[in-house]
Image: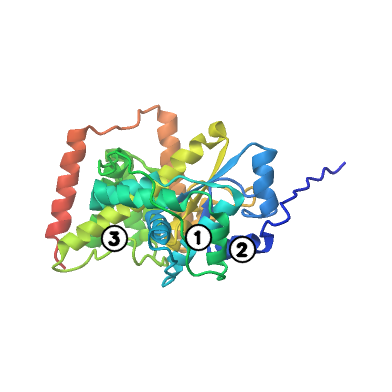
């Protein structure tokens, strides 16, 4: 016998507006779920309510820094600056999440800002983000729907004292991988596939086999990938500090991805469902490959099929096989995962930075 689940909203709930916001987010390709979406759709209102009330799952968005900063800006300035698509994404994501009572987990974004701009700047923006994220759903929806152009979300929240400028250990490791990717790219030794395999070998033999960083590299080295912006100013002939800044930014992108994987690994125990969110569509596409398996199933493609977006079908399958082969070898060998000491990380970082800084075309 079929069981029907009926969801009733309050009479004044702006259902049409909220459904339109959900469709706009889905059409924009800015979300990557860390779970198999329901048949009704990832942001279907009934599915969100059913997951919460009947299954006991909270849905949590993991926004990157660009989205978080724009949300805070709306609270600080009192209006939505819609000069770019990412600002629009930030606006409608906050409006939708408040309407549906969903949560954000933006900690990596504020560690990124703190590392780049210092604690004072990061904490000021965090206080405005907290002001933006307090209950004001109808104000956000009105602005997102175009019925208002300004909103008063009140004063910023009290400043906190966490050391947001302290580099995350995960970021430091990802930075070493990013420096290695940059070197392989600038050396131009071998084909794109050979460079990607060389990175996998180096991670397996000499460093840490980090899946999110490897996934980032599969797109970056992909001949068909729209990889512009993944490493900013890498080949700038004179402004080598700009190249270093671009590598650091790529390492933060990898850290957002690794945080996504870590949280999804704990999601069932926490009764949470995580959704990665970014206005960087390349980063969202990478996030969408992180949980794929050797074979297709449950409505998801295999990893080889997904990588064919950036590689020829043959090379995509070769690369997917190479990744799973190394994971299986690690699991079967019982070899402990390497855990580089702080001194080793410092030395590898300095060596990588020196190479990138002194490179010339």
* Residue to which mark 1 is pinned: 30
* Residue to which mark 3 is pinned: 190
Q: Which mark is residue 302?
A: none
Q: At 45% across and 42% down in the image, what residue appears?
A: 261
Q: First in sequence, mark 3 or 2: give its number.
A: 2
Query: Would you say the residues marked 3 and 2 are in contact, meaning their CB atoms lie under 8 Å apart?
Result: no
The crowding category of the residue bearing disc 2, from other C-alpha atoms within 10 Å (few below 14, some 14 to 19, many at least 20), is some
Front-lying residue, 65 or 210: 65
Residue 147 higher or lower than 272, as above or below: below
Front-lying residue, 321 or 271: 271
* Residue to which mark 2 is pinned: 23
x, y percentage for residue 192? 34, 61
Alpha carbons under labels 3 and 2: distance apart: 43 Å
Front-lying residue, 66 or 230: 66
Q: Give the label, 1 or 3, closer to the camera.
A: 1
Front-lying residue, 309 or 9: 9
Q: Give the label, 3 or 2, closer to the camera.
A: 2
Q: At 38% across and 59% down in the image, what residue appears?
A: 76
User: Is 349 left or right of 326, judged from the image as shown?
Assistant: left
Q: At 45% across and 57% down in the image, what residue appears?
A: 278
Q: First in sequence, mark 1 or 2: give its number.
A: 2
x, y percentage for residue 330? 40, 34
Alpha carbons under labels 1 and 3: distance apart: 34 Å
x, y percentage for residue 35? 57, 45
Please identify the quarter of the rendering in which residue 269 is found. Answer: top right
Please identify the quarter of the rendering in which residue 139 is found. Answer: bottom right
Query: Would you say the residues marked 1 and 3 are in contact, meaning their CB atoms lie under 8 Å apart?
Result: no
Q: Secondary structure at mark 1?
A: loop
Q: Secondary structure at mark 2?
A: helix
Alpha carbons under labels 1 and 2: distance apart: 11 Å
The crowding category of the residue bearing disc 1, from other C-alpha atoms within 10 Å (few below 14, some 14 to 19, many at least 20), is many
Q: Is residue 293 visible?
A: no
């Amino acid at each position: 016998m079929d069981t029907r689940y009926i969801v009733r909203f309050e009479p004044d709930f702006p259902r049409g507006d909220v459904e339109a916001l959900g469709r706009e987010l889905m059409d924009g390709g800015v979300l990557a779920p860390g779970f198999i979406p329901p048949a009704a759709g990832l942001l279907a209102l009934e599915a969100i309510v059913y997951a919460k009330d009947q299954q006991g799952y909270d849905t949590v968005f993991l926004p990157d820094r660009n989205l978080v900063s724009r949300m805070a800006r709306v609270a600080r300035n009192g209006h939505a600056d819609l000069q770019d698509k990412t600002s629009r994404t930030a606006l409608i994501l906050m409006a939708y999440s408040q309407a549906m009572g969903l949560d954000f987990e933006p900690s990596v974004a504020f560690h990124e800002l703190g590392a780049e701009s210092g604690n004072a700047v990061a904490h000021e923006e965090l206080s405005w983000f907290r002001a933006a994220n307090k209950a004001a759903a109808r104000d956000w929806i009105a602005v997102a729907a175009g019925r208002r152009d300004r909103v008063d979300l009140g004063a910023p929240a009290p400043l906190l004292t966490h050391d947001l400028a302290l580099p995350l250990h995960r970021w430091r490791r990802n930075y070493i991988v990013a420096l290695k990717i940059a070197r392989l790219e600038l050396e131009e030794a071998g084909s794109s596939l050979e460079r990607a395999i060389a990175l996998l070998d180096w991670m397996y033999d000499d460093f840490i086999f980090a899946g999110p960083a490897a996934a980032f590299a599969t797109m970056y080295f992909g001949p068909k990938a729209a990889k512009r912006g993944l490493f900013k100013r890498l080949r700038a002939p004179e402004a080598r500090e700009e190249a270093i800044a671009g590598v650091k930014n790529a390492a933060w992108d990898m850290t957002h991805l690794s945080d996504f994987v870590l949280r999804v690994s704990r999601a069932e125990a926490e009764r949470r469902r995580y959704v990665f969110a970014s206005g960087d569509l390349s980063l969202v596409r990478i996030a969408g490959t992180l949980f794929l398996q050797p074979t297709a199933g449950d409505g998801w493609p295999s990893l080889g099929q997904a990588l064919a977006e950036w590689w020829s079908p043959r090379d995509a399958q070769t690369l997917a096989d190479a990744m799973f082969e190394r994971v299986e070898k690690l699991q079967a060998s019982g070899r402990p995962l390497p855990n580089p000491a702080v001194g080793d990380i410092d030395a590898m970082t300095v060596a990588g930075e020196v190479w990138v800084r002194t490179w010339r075309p």
